[in-house]
Structures are given as structure tokens and as C-alpha cells.
Image (tube, rainbow, N blue to C red):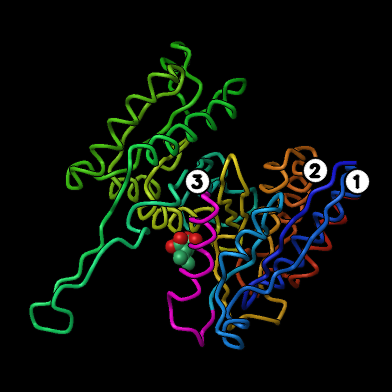
Amino acid sequence: MKEYNIAVVEGDGIGPEVVREGLKVIDAASEKFAFKVKTKKFDFGGERYLKTQEVLSDEEVSELAKYDAIFLGGIGHPDVKPGILEKGILLKLRFDLDQYINLRPVKLYENVETPLKGKGPEDIDFIVFRENTGGLYTGVGEFKDKGTADEVAIQSMVYSRKQVERCIRYAFEALKKRHENNPWKGLTPEQKDQGFYAKLTLCGKTNVLTYVFDLWQRVFDEVAQEYPQIVPDYCHVDAICIYMVEDPKRFNGIVTNNMFGDIITDLAAVTQGGMGVAPSGNINPDGVSMFEPVHGTAPSFANQGVINPIATILTAVMMLNHLGEVEAAAAIEASTKGVIKQMKSMLVGKMGYTTSQIGDMVVDGIKS
Ligand code: IPM
Ligand code: MN
């Protein structure tokens, strides 16, 4: 029997509650599909920091690197100054484990309400490939004359060709795998006739960021040559925001830098029904990947059973797919779709069920 070792970081706020539901469905799926999941919990997060002043040590990162995957709830604490835990835990893990892709599927499920008027599941189904270890997030910058009237602050968007290339290549490769035998439905008849099966949009700002996005565009064009059946597309980040709302159907895959990816995936998450349903994966294709719902820790809603665990359950689906347990992942997703149909809303406290009831319902669906 296959066995997976999963490091579990519940984190703060609502983290433990949603992780509990995620693990519950993974357990049920592992029983049905005959594999074993061994979990070990790590208490990194705000509570530990407040008690011990420890954030996350290099030794602890090395320990996590031994696992098959990391399952994370949420990191952030109202009593800790913003930045300490985010940088010290979440970003440190992404960087040190070289999880260079932040994978954010954007899919509107049947019966989920979207704020986009007149749009349905057939309109919203794409993947954002966010570069996850570079750009503005590297912390390169400085203050000059800090505290004076002439103060200047600099934060640099730094990208190496290698970083850009591996990200873009991952996006093309992922779309190839997804669509070579199952062409994307949004292609024009002409594109279909020409043998295209997918479309990848580079999201940038080539009209202003003339160094960084010049590099991205050149690398994109080069790599695109190797994928002659994927339509290469470009869109400025501001225009992406327009189209994501007006005409999301035009997107199949979007590849972008770290900062734009952070911003557009929050917008995208809202279109797919909000933070209650948005999953994500921090992927190192050659190492250890980490899976986390896009939402944060929502401390004011903790321990009331009002939080929607669907985002975390869909995150578990991503993790199992990544581990190769595709049947189990498909079964959880199918069951989740059924449960979503029974829920009144995806919003906090309006679901018609408690957090753990939703987990139980997904489990029932897997077993049946
Ligand atoms: C996210 C979050 C993080 C980010 C924060 C908490 C550092 O917003 O995962 O999107 O900016 O990447
Ligand atoms: Mn974000």
C-alpha cells in the first residue's frame, strides 16, 4: 500500500478548523482508494511565536523538506505585527523550499454564487500560474535618509532569466498536460482547425515595467515556440482586471509575476464565489510542495463553526492530485460538488451547515 507522509501546519485563527475538515476527507478517500496518509502536526504560527518568540528555523524547514507534502491552514495573528509571521513562516517556506509556482485554479462550481452578473460555471474556469519566489517579494530594497523629509524608499522587482523561464515553462507544460487530449472549449473555430488545444496569457505591464516585463515577454515568446499548439497571448495586468470581470471566458491559463499574481488571484477568487472556495498550491516540481487555502486566518470567526471548509477541501484535492492519487482526488471533488449544491451560500455563517457538518457531508459522498 502506498504511504504518504504529510506535514500539517494548522496555523492560527480558523486554520485548525479547516484543516480538520481537510484531513477528514483525505482519511475517507485514503480508506476507499487504499493508500495510507501519515500526518505530523507542526505548531508554527502566531500562538507559538507569542509564547516563545520563535518564527521558523532553518532546521525546522529542513525537517519539513523530508515530507511528501505540506498541508497548511493559515498563518497570521492579530497580536503579532504584520509581516513577521507572513515573511518568517509563509514566505520563508515558499522561498527556502523553492516552491516557485503558486498554482491557483479559478473555477466557478455549479450553484456557487458569483458577483459577476449573468456569468455561470461555463464562463469561469482557468488557472493562474503565479511566480512564487521572486520579484517584489524578494525583499531587495532600501531606505535612504530614513525619517527625514528627503526620505526615499526603494523596493526592487528582481527577476533572473532562469526564474522567469522555469515559471513560464511550467505553465505551458501544465496546459499541455491538461488539454492535449481535451482541447479547451474557448478556442475559436479557426484556432481549433489550426490544431491549437489551449491558450496561455502572459499578464504583465510591458508599457511601463520595461525591464522586467521585457524579459518576461522575450522568454515567453521563446518558450512558446516549443508549444506550437498553445495560443500565446498577452494582456496588461490592468486590462486583465477588466476582462476577468467582463469576459472571464477568454482565459484558459494566465502566467504572471509574484505581485500581480497575488493581486489578480484575489479578484479571481471573488469571481469564483469568494475566499470560501479558493484553493492553492505552492509547487516545487522537484521537491516538496505546500497546499493552502487562499483565505487567511480570519481570527474573529475562529471556533464558531461558521467558516467554509470547501477551500481547504479543494486544496486537499490539489494535494492528492499532486501526489498522484488522482482517483481519490476526483472522488473528493465529485462529492464536494454535490455538497456545494446543498449549501445555501459559500459565505461565512450563511452556509446552512456548520464547518464540520460540511466536512461530514463530503465524507459521506466519498463513501457512497
Ligand atoms: C497570499 C497571501 C500572501 C502573499 C501574504 C500573506 C504574504 O496574500 O498567499 O496570497 O502575499 O503571497
Ligand atoms: Mn494574497
Give the residue at x 57% y 87%. 50
Q: Amino acid at mark 2?
A: Ala
> Is there a contact, CB below 8 Å, between mark 3 and mark 1?
no
Query: Could you say which quadrant of the image residue 359 lies in?
Result: bottom right
Q: Is residue 342 above or below residue 165?
A: below
Mark sitting on residue 32:
1
At 46% from the left edge and 18% from the top edge, which residue is drawn? Answer: 229
| Left or right of 2, for residue 262 | left
The residue identified by callout 3 is: 101
> Which image quarter: residue 295?
bottom right
- Residue in the image at 33% along x and 42% along y: 160
Task: Measuring from the top left, give residue 182's x and y in whole percent.
Answer: 61, 23
Pick the front one: 61 or 301:
61
Ligand 1 neighbours mark 2 (CB distance < 8 Å): no
Depth check, mark 3 against mark 1: the one in front is 3
Q: Secondary structure at mark 1?
A: helix
Q: Can residue 243 be found in the magenta stretch?
A: no
Depth check, front residue: 103 or 159: 159
Pointer 1 and pointer 2: residues touching (CB < 8 Å)? yes
Q: Which residues are magenta?
A: 77-100
Mark 3 is surrounded, within 10 Å at the Cα level, by few (under 14), some (14 to 19) or many (20 or more) other residues, namely many
The reply, left or right, for residue 240 in relation to residue 16 is left
Residue 307 in the image: x percent, y percent? 66, 72
Q: Is residue 82 magenta?
A: yes
* Residue at image mark 2: 328
- At mark 3, the secondary structure is strand
